Image: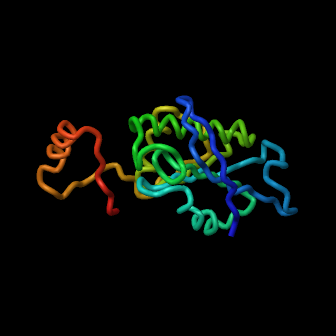
Amino acid sequence: MRQAQPSRFTTSDGTALFYRHWPGQDGDGQSGADRDSQDQRAIVLLHRGHEHSGRLQHVVDELALPEVPCFAWDARGHGLSPGPRGHAPSFMTLVRDLDEFVQHIHTTHRIPLAGICVVAQSVGAVIAATWIHDYAPPIRGLILAAPAFDVRLYIPFAIPGLRLWQRLRGESYVTSYV
């Protein structure tokens, strides 16, 4: 099992988001950061909407790519990142956070954007798809696993009820049982 190194990066609005970095090793056991930057590549993993980066350890292990560094963040309000549970000021804040996270990996770990592949699932996949559409970063690849493009509420009048509840009670949260 590869060991993650905990770290943080600061977003443009001053929020320090937590992330895990699993360094890559080449055949000689050297850190991937010691190789020529042209050969550098990385995998960025995005967690589902109700989880955190620690839940992606098994993905890093199952990929069986010890030479490739992996990175996974805790989105705002998840895991060890600050904020109310599951809350971000807006969906686009999460998209901007992803762009700033990838830029952080690029500058701090000297990995060219063309060497980065993003693997995302559920709500993380929707964030990644929006990021690709709106920012058009020149990354190597994007894998979307079960993107949550549509949320189905099976309770009649759920959305109008939630809107009314928010007007009466202010900011509130719905527990996810996914």
Which residue is pictured at 50% across the width and 47% down the height? 75
Residue 100 sits above or below residue 176 on the image: above
Q: Quadrant of residue 24?
A: bottom right
Which residue is pictured at 54% across the width and 51% down the height? 80
Q: Residue furthest top?
A: 12
Residue 18: x and y, percent?
59, 47
Q: Quadrant of the C terminus?
A: bottom left
Q: Quadrant of the N terminus?
A: bottom right
Q: Is residue 91 left or right of residue 75?
A: left
Q: Is residue 24 left or right of residue 6?
A: right
Q: Residue furthest left?
A: 156
Which residue is pictured at 18% across the width and 58% down the height? 154
Q: Nearer the viewer, residue 91 or 14?
A: 14
Q: Nearer the viewer, residue 36 or 90?
A: 90
Q: Is residue 62 left or right of residue 50?
A: right
Q: Residue furthest front?
A: 169
Q: Quadrant of residue 22?
A: bottom right
Q: Is residue 165 left or right of residue 58?
A: left
